[in-house]
Structure formats: structure tokens, C-alpha cells
Amino acid sequence: MTHPGVTMKIKNVSIAIIVLSLVIFLKAGTPTADTARYNVLVVMSYGPDYAFVQEVQQGIESTLGETCQIKFFYLDTKKDFSGGPQKAKQAYAFYKAHPIDGVIASDDTAQSMFVVPYLKNKVKTPVMFCGVNAAPEKYGYPAANVSGILERHPISQTLAFAKQLLPSAKTYGFMAFDSPSGRSALEIFHQKEKTFPIQLVTARFPKTFDQAQTIAKALKSQCDILYMPTMHGLKDAQGNPLPEKTIVQEIARTFGKPLISGNHYNIRYGMLCGVVKTGQEQGATASKMLLKAMAGTPVSQIPITRNRLGKAMINVTVMKALGIKPKPILLKGTELVRTEP
């Protein structure tokens, strides 16, 4: 007969073995400074609470997580644009103080505030950008040590899809938070607008939520559809940044007509539809390009590319509220979602 105290000790030892095995397993699956093949610095233009940043990070970690030690820096320029250069300086200080094998810089302000002043044609470390809305020539790309993937909104496809849902639509407005990415996106739109199935009547760049609401109210009588790539960074009357979900839902109420976007999370927040891109594609593609460079392929042999994936989405909650009855063929292969509560 086993004494109860002995039984308890055996159980405790078994639990300890299980816990120790789990710790060893987790450590084995996560590179450490000693086991990682490469050290990678990732500089994000925006903060970690931004949905697109989270997507990009997922793409990077899924591609580099098993072979690289990754350090993330967030310039957070949606919330504090003026503080971006100082944070970029801190990121550069980290770069100089550590053996960095490769760099990924995401979105536009990371290029203008970090890559261009500190790394482009100044160091041998390969740099891959992602999420860039401007023409690459704006930053002098490609450079001797810089290449990457451009972010291009599938605006033609999104407008065509919206036109199929709303055959009577003839005009659309454009509204984005006043930021380098928003204005760069409009520049790209202008280059392609001759191919669009409906006409752009105006583009506006609010800096505050109150301004955005005033613009949405005015646009209600000026256009049939409102395209909003992102409104992340808008602040309330007290200067506090608002969640993008709140912004989308409130502007949808004010505008009273369909909102569309190329970001899937915005459609889930309360927009009608879009052909969506993903940050995961941006992060994963930049990571694969960087791996090639770190393995010895000259950056000059890694050409700049752009996102290629796109998927049609419809928010059925919004569709029903607007009384839209689509042709069955439009639903084939389309992801149907409902507005998040």
C-alpha cells in the first residue's frame, strides 16, 4: 500500500516533468539570440494597436519566426507624427548597437524618417520595405541596399465590384486620415482613374473626427459611394485617438450611403464591400525578399514588387440595411461577413 504522502510526491514530480518538457518545447520553437540564424530589425510606421500593423507583423513572424531573432520598433506616427523622427533616431541607435543582418521598414513614414536618412546607400545591411503607398521614386528606391513590396489598393476592382452591387452608382468620394500614406494612395488613384467605372468627385483629408463627420455629411449630397482606405489616427475633441471601428460606424451613419475599402477589417467594421488586400502578404513577401538578401543575393537582383492577392468581401449586415439585393453570381467566391458588434 502506497502512503498518501508518497503518492502526492509522485504526482508533483510528474507535473514538474510535464512543465519542464513544455518549457523545453516552447524554447525549441522560438529562436534565441544564440540559435537564431539572423538578427532582423523591423521598423513600423504606426503603433501595435493598428490592425494593418498586426497583419504585417503576422506575415513577418510566420516567415522569419523559425530562423530569425526579430526586434520590432513602432514609430506610432498616426497618433504622434511629430514624435516620429525621435523614435526613428532611437531605432537607428539600436541598429548601430547590435549586429543587425537585415531590416524591414513598413509603410511610408518609416521610409522618410528612418530608411532614407539613416540606411539608404549608407550601410551594407539589406533593407526591404513593405506597405509603401507612394511611388518608390519618391524615396529614391530601388537603392543599392533597398528593395521591397509596394502596397497598392485594389481600387479599380473595388469600384467595379461596388458598381455591380449598385448599378445606379455614378460617383464616389475619397476620404482618408491626413497622413503621408493617405495622400500617397490618392496620387496612385489619380494615375489610374481613367480606368475606373465611376467618377471621383472629391478627395478630403480630415485631421479630426469632427472634421470627418462634417465632410461625410457634405459628401452625402455629392457622391453615391465613399471610399475610405483608412481613418486610423483620427482624434476626438479632447485629442484622444479613436478606434477605427468607432470611426467607420459613425461615419457610415452620417454618410447614409455605402462605404467601401480595400481593407478587410474596415468591411467587418461596417463598410459595404471591397476587394481586399492583406498586411500578411506585405509582411511575408518583404520577409522572403530579405531572406534572399541575407543569404547572399545582391539586393540589385531582388526587384521591387507589389501585392498581388485580392479577395471580394461583402458585409451582409450593411447590404440588407441598404436594401441591396445582389445577383447570385456576385456571391460566388465572395466572403460574406457581418458587422462586428
Image: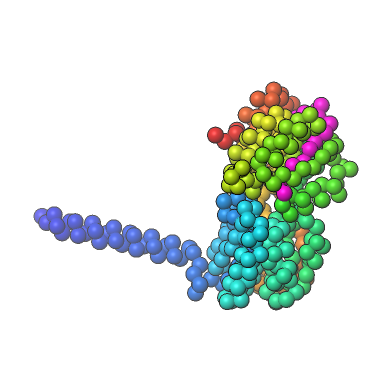
Give the residues drawn in magenta, as a range: 162-178
- Of 276 and 189, which appears nearest the observer? 189
Q: Quadrant of residue 155?
A: top right
Q: Which residue is depicted at the point 81% across and 32% down?
A: 222
- Counting from the top left corner in percent of width and height, residue 64 is at 59, 63
Left or right, 150 with respect to 52, comes to right
- Of 14 and 204, which appears nearest the observer? 204
Left or right, 4 with respect to 119, comes to left
Residue farthest to the front, as pictured: 238
Q: Which residue is depicted at the point 78% across and 64% down?
A: 139
- Counting from the top left corner in percent of width and height, residue 209 is at 65, 41
Residue 165 inside the magenta-drawn segment = yes
Residue 58 inside the magenta-drawn segment = no
**How many numbered dots are placed on residues in this image?**
0
Q: Quadrant of residue 147?
A: bottom right
In the displayed structure, 113 sits above or below 133; it is: below
Residue farthest to the right, as pictured: 194
